[in-house]
Structure formats: structure tokens, C-alpha cells
Amino acid sequence: MKHSMVAAAAASALAVPASLLTAIPASATPDGSTVVISEVYGAGANAGASYDQDFVELFNPTTAAVDLAGTSIQYRSATGISDPTGVADLTGTIAAGGHFLVGLAKGGTGADLPVAPDVQATGINISASKGTVFLADRTGALSAPPTGSLTGDPQVLDLVGFGATNTFETAAAPAPSSTSSISRAAEGTDTDDNAADLSAGAPSPAAAGGGSEPPGEGGTATIEQIQGTGDSSPMSGMSVVTSGLVTASYRTGGFNGFYLQTPGTGGDIDLATHHASDAVFVYLGGARADSAPPVGSHVTVSGTVSEFRGLTELDADDVTTDPDAAPAVKPATVVWPRTDAERESLEGMLIDPQGDYTVSDNYATNQYAEIGLATGDHPLPTPTDVADPHDAAAIAAVETDNAARLITLDDGASTNFLTSGKDVPLPWLTQDHELRVGAPVRFTSPMVVDYRNNLWKLQPTGQLTAADAAPATFGHTRQDAPAPTGGNLHLASFNVLNYFPTTGADWVASGGTCTWYDDREGNHITVKNCTDAAGDDGPRGAADQANLERQQIKIVHAINHLGADIVSLEEIENSAKFAHSRDWAVAKLVDALNAEAGAHTWRYVPTPPTAGDQSDEDVIRTAFIYKPARVKAVGPSIIDDAPAFDVARDPLAQAFAPRRGGLDQRFAVIVNHFKSKGSGPDDGTGQGNSNPQRIAEADELTQFADRVQATYHTPRVFLSGDFNSYTQEDPMRHLYAAGYTDIGSTEAPGEYTYQFDGMVGSLDHVLANRAALGMVRGAHVWNINSVEPVALEYSRYNDNATDFYAPDPFRASDHDPLVVGIDSGSR
């Protein structure tokens, strides 16, 4: 069973999340209000040591169980002044008045620990005589907590400095040895003074069960008794004998075992009264995996109960076939539970999932053959796309609902198809059937409830291969063109995913250096990083001409079927950086578009003659293309080369008018590409890195738009592009406050342009001021990119034994285009 957010550690105690523990000024709790470090032993890898591994023991002096999720044990050497040398993230629960054992480095000649650690983290090697151990209110490394007599760090819940160390509470505890640990003189007492609170003595590790007796013998037990009703087995560490029917068998794929369920269980169960699972995973190990009994076998298993990364297992010593007939297991007919407790009651069981399911994440499908699902008829939303980032309750409500709806569909294997599995055809994905975010899911075979890699999963009853009939199917949701929007002209925004006619091979030929992403045969496909002798950035995108052509075919098909008359482009090469005119790359794209659509179908907006060469701009830029038979460009374009965009891309403005219309029908469009969320400082508001920078860019953009209105003599302004900001985030709110309306969210609610981390939202927008909004007749997102598996992208060409590349518009980029219909007043 997994360590859930709320654990039943005592019948009358409620679990308290670690995030609610008080981080007190001296990182100690004299009032006994939170968990403390109760013992530290660091000689486990030394000759003559009492035990063969290091450990840290925690103690809960409170009257309530405490959930440790989100905390960690961290170690810093006696002379360290920066990041810790080891971090162990914690999961699990400490009962009121109970202990929790964290096993660390192992390898000495001493005895085994008398109790099994609750968490094992062998990568941390503590000094036997001096150092500092932190209990931190976070996962991942602490950001250089202070040294000396600690005066406070909000991330530190408790620390113990011992021996000749530079970090401690008031004074360091005495130095332990190979045969001694340091432990609290009185359990739970913490007076902010390590020297006074801890003393050296014989090590006495205690785990969550308390005490230090060896594991007991459980004898014969039912599977329900083995599972228990909590988040971990009450029989963990015991040797038991049990029997049941095999419901899933994994002889191949890396699971190395099978699922065993009590005969006659399943069917129409009531989760309100069903508290203990009737199934358990039996682990055989790699050497015996091929001996896993087939599905339907009635077997008796003897072995030791254990918890492996949250999954209750029976580590089998012996498996024998039972000749007696047994009542069949029926798949439990249940809607996917919203709570961990209800999911725990199904762990390992065969189920027939009821209700609606929707694909919400396919990013890892070409790596681990995993598919993120959401219960209901829509994917999981990005919280800041639908809620105010500063409304903690609203954000928490979205996050809570997302967690309740999430389930991962897996392939019954641990294969990594980006490493050792490249030559193995991917399951789930085929060349002739789509698997898109937003698609409805229909289960055609029973699935097993599993918990692996910190995720609740549905597993097939054996390893799924490309040759097998999949136990679930996915609805067809592709559209050959955007839905109609109305209007007599159409605007669109399109991020073209680092379209660089200057390829990596071209850069190397001119004297630069590049690193690459290669296919399974070692051929370069895309650029990882290119630089010149001075370390300046080179091109991105395709590695060579063959890959550029694959990329270009998809982009050309997408734009030519977009139905737009004006398209703003983002992530296109700034050719001024590569010894060409600034417009060389966009001209190449227009030539390719016209080669397919017909001569003179498209034209690009040239860089204004007053702009200079713009070689100090980013390697990517913004651009416009348009259909001269439908619209005309009025006057030269304008670049906003303002300091706010020195770390992003300069906005580009252009006025347009209908081809047969008068100048009184002109309107201006400004294309943007704000600073990304992937670099720069994080302001802690949940909006990604560089949020203040994007706010500054939004404010500069509104001032630029005012100048554009005056220059082009039109009150009507549209803002388009990749704003790297979800719909409710601060930069967008600054634009709304300045009088601009987001057309996508108002005209196409529930549609989205981007998928990230299993959630959907819109980073790409078209906005209109009040005058321009009167022209709008409708809008729709054409989901051809973000919802498609990344395996279809040109950058994954020949990455798997199955060739998923096709010369079509699907997965031409990672952002979806938004099309807006307007009425220009001219027909």
C-alpha cells in the first residue's frame, strides 16, 4: 500500500500534514509540538561498527499522527557551508508517540539493523563523529542554511549538529563513535541546545512500529489480513502463507511477479464498506520471473510481507499450485475512487472501470507507455488557467479536484522506450490510430489497480506489446480544419517550434560546435545546443536538411489548412544572427508555403528599414505572414525594441486592411513572444519562473500598443502570440486591466492551446481592445499539436522501432494555433 496523505496510525488520531508543522525560530520545539530527530548513527560503513548502515531516527512527541510527505532528511558535512551532501525525501506517517527510521548508507561489517527502516536512502553517508543532520520542511536540497549556532531557517524543522561541526543548535552534541550513536536524553525533549538534549550511547534504532524486536512470524493469513485497512501492511516484515487466484502475470517487462486475489471476491462492491483489498502483488525477482503462474492459476504462496515504494508485496519464497477448484474472481465494477483511502481498498484488485474517462496526458507515452487519464469528460486543467493564482482557496480547489480525477494507464512493464527499449515497438500507439489528449476512453478488458512511481495506475493483466489487442480504445477527435468562426477575415497565432533554415550541420560547417539529439541508430535529428567560439548561441531546430524538410512539411500543411488570412509567427529563426538578412528564414517559409498552395498565395511582412540588423536580438523572433489576395499591409511594420524585451523577443506590429476595403477599415496586429517559464527567478506565485519579467513585458506592450494606434491612425488593435502566460495569470490580468479582452477564453471557452505536466491550458492568445472587439465574430483552437503524442513530432523521427512520422499537420509544433474570425466591414 502507498503512503497516503492521511494515514490511520492510531484509531483515534488524525494525521497532521507536515506542511502544517510549525517551523520555529531555532528549528526546535521545546513545547513538544512537532517531530524531532531522536537518534543519529553514522558509523555504518566503518570497520568495527555496531550496525552495517547509517540511520536517522525520528520521534513524534505529539498526540496525533503526522504525515511526513513533503519533508526530507538532509546531511551536511562538519565543514560544509552550502548545499547538503545528501537528501532523503520522506513518505509515510509517524503515529502519536511513535518512531520512524530512515536507513542511510550501507556496506559495513556490522550487524543488520534489528528493525526494517521505514524509508531506505542508501545514498547518504554520515560521518561517524561529526556533521549536521537536518529535518527539512521540503523535498530537494536546502538552499544553504546558515552555519554556526542556528538562529532560524523557515525550511528547517529540526537539526542535530554533533562533534566538531560548524552548524548546531546553541552547542553541538558530543561526538559518537563506531559503536555509539547520539540520541535524546529524554524522548521528545528539545530545548534548542544539541549539547544538552543529546548524548552518546549504544545505538537503539526503532521503526514505525516502535521497539526493536525482529520481525514476527505471521503463519497463515488471508490476503485481506496482509493488506489491512491502512496505507501499509500491519504484517510488514512477517513471514506468512496465503493463497488465491492469479489475476495478472508478468513474466516479462520487469515487474517480475504476479497479482493474487482471494477467490470469489470482486463484482459489485460498495467502497463505503470495502476497507481492505482482496489482492496483493507477489514478487518473484528477475531470476524467477518466467516462473510466474499463468492467469487463472490457484496457488499458495509463502514469503515475507514488505512495502516497496508504497506497494504492498509478498516477497515469495515458494509458490505451489493448489489442485482444488476455487470460485472465480470477478472484476470489481467501480467508478475510479476520488480518495487515497478508497484506492487503497482496491490496491491490486481486478476492476472493470465504470464511468467516463478522458485522455489528459500522453507526453510520457513514447517513453514509458503511460497515458494519463482523467475521470469525466474533459482533461485536467492547469490551475492558473482557470483560477486566480493569488486566490489560494481557488487554486487548491482545482489541484484537489485534479488529484481526485487522475489515474495513469500503463503497459504492465517498466521498459524505458527512450533508452533500452528503442528497438521495441511501442504499445498503445500505432501508425493508423490516434491517441490524443481530450479523447474519450473505453475499456475493453479488466485492469489491475497498481501503485508505482508515486502514481496510482491501471495495469493490463500481462505486459502489453504492440502485437497485443489493447485493453482500452481511444475516440477519434481529429479535425481536418479548424471549426468555423464566422467573419470575412481570419487571424491566427502559430508557434512554429524553432523553425531554423540554418541547420545544426550548417553551423558546424561554418566553424561552430553543436551537441545533438540522435535517433536509435545514432543519426543526428535535432540540435541540443549550438555555440560559437565565444560561447554565443547558435541555431536550434533541425540537425540537417533532411530533418528540416520533415519539419517544414508539417508546418506548411498546418498553415495552409489553417484558413487564416493573417498569421502571427513565433519561434522562427532570427536570421540576422546567422549572416543573413533578418527576414531570410521567414522568406524561406513563405516560399515553401507558396510551393504547396500556389504562387503568391502568401507574403511576409518585412522588417522595417529603420530597425537595423537586429543581430542583438534573440536567435528566435516574431513575424507576420498574410495572404495578399485577402488583405494588404498598410505602412511599414514597427518593432518595439524596448529594454523589457531584452530577455525575450521584440513585439512586431503591422496595420492591415481588407484588400478591397478602404483605409478606414484598417486595424493593427501586434505579435508577441514573452519570456518563457523555464528560466529566471521564481516569485513563488505558482506562475513559473520570470513572472515579474512577463508582467513588465505586458505593461510595456500596452504602452507600445498606444503608440501603434497613433502611428497607424486606427483605434483597433489586436495582440497575438505566445504570451507564456496562462489565462488567469498576472501578465494577462495586466492586459485585461489595460482594456484588452482574451478572445479565446470568451469565444471558445473550454478550448486550450498547450499541454504540460498532464494538464491543459492556453499560453497562446489573441486579445482585442474595445474597438477591435467589435469586429470579432468567433474563435476556435485547432488542436493539431499539443494534444498529439510527441512521438509524432519530426524531432522523434526513427526514435522507436515503429515509424510514427507522417507528412501531415499533426504535431507540427507543441503549441496549437488559435483562429479568430473578424468582420472587417468589407465583403
Image (cartoon, rainbow, N blue to C red):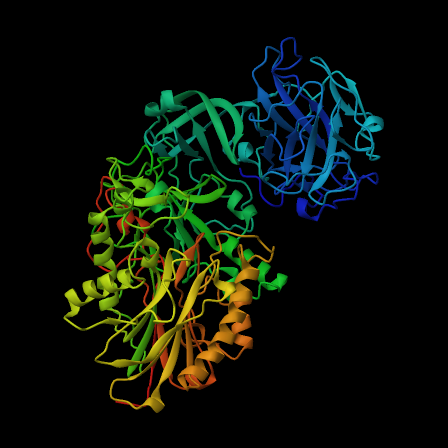
Above or below residue 774? Residue 392 is: above
Viewer-side residue, 399 vs 124: 124
Residue 770 in sight from this viewpoint: yes
| Count of all numbered marks drawn on residues in the image | 0
In this view of the protein, which residue sits in the foreground, 301 or 378?
378
Residue 402 appears left or right of 358: right
Taking the image as shown, residue 30 lies to the left or right of residue 726, namely right
Say which residue appears at 41% left-offset and 53% top-offset.
373
Q: Residue at x 32, y 67 (%)?
A: 782
Q: Residue at position x 60%, y 56% from top? A: 683
Residue 826's x, y, as percent? 28, 90
Foreground residue among 515 and 284? 515
Quadrant of the image containing the C terminus = bottom left
Q: Give the left or right position of residue 318, taking residue 636 as reference.
A: right
Q: Nearer the viewer, residue 470 or 160?
A: 160
* Percent coordinates x, y for residue 158 in the rendering: 73, 36
- Is residue 427 in sight in this rendering? no
Could you say which quadrant of the image residue 524 lies in?
top left
- Quadrant of the image occupied by residue 487: bottom left
Where in the figure is residue 738, as x and y percent of width and height?
Answer: 54, 77
Which residue occupies the extreme top position in the image?
Answer: 48
Q: In the figure, 329 relative to 54: above or below?
A: below
Residue 320 position, x and y percent, is: 39, 21
Position of residue 695 relative to residue 302, above or below, is below
98 on left or right of 713: right
